[in-house]
Image (tube, rainbow, N blue to C red):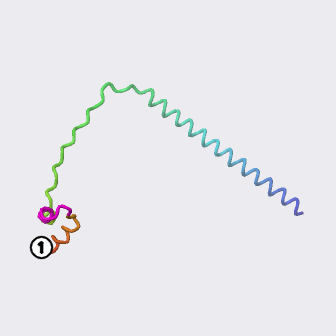
Amino acid sequence: MAKRTMRRAAKTVKRSVKRSVKRSVKRSVKKAKSMSKSMSKSMSKPMPKKMKAKKAKKAKGKKKPSAWNQHLMMVLKSMRKSNPSANLTDAMIEAKKTYKKN
């Protein structure tokens, strides 16, 4: 009895594999046909004579620096006068002490 059920199970597995292979082949053939149709449609359309020129983008102006940035740059310049190797980090520490928000 057990051998017979094993054979039946093997047959059903083989059948299901065959079905799935057939389905996948059908799908791939269907996809290929649709791709070839879309390609032939695009190839049959006449090419446009002239392409429209793109509009030039307007140049955007720079944003003006914030009050903090201006203060920071002033502190950095004054620090560089006395010490040319001053960093922005050092300037931030100094500017933090003197900066007052509005």
Residue placed at 77% from the left, 54% from the top? 12
> What kind of residue is marked 1?
Thr
What quarter of the picture does the C terminus occupy?
Answer: bottom left
Type of secondary structure dominating the magenta stretch: helix
Say if 31 sits above or below 66 in the image.
above
Find residue 71 and report its horizontal and vertical position in percent: 12, 65
Q: Is residue 81 magenta?
A: yes
Start and end of the magenta stretch? 73-85
Horizontal side of 84 relative to 2 (left or right) equals left
Rendering quarter of residue 72: bottom left
Residue found at x 76% / y 54%: 13
Mark 1 closeness class: few <14, some 14–19, many ≥20 residues within 10 Å: few
Is residue 82 positioned above or below 39 on the image?
below
Q: Position of residue 67 (x, y in %)?
A: 12, 65
Residue bearing the label numbered 1: 98
Q: Position of residue 62 (x, y in %)?
A: 16, 52
Q: Nearer the viewer, residue 54 or 27?
A: 54
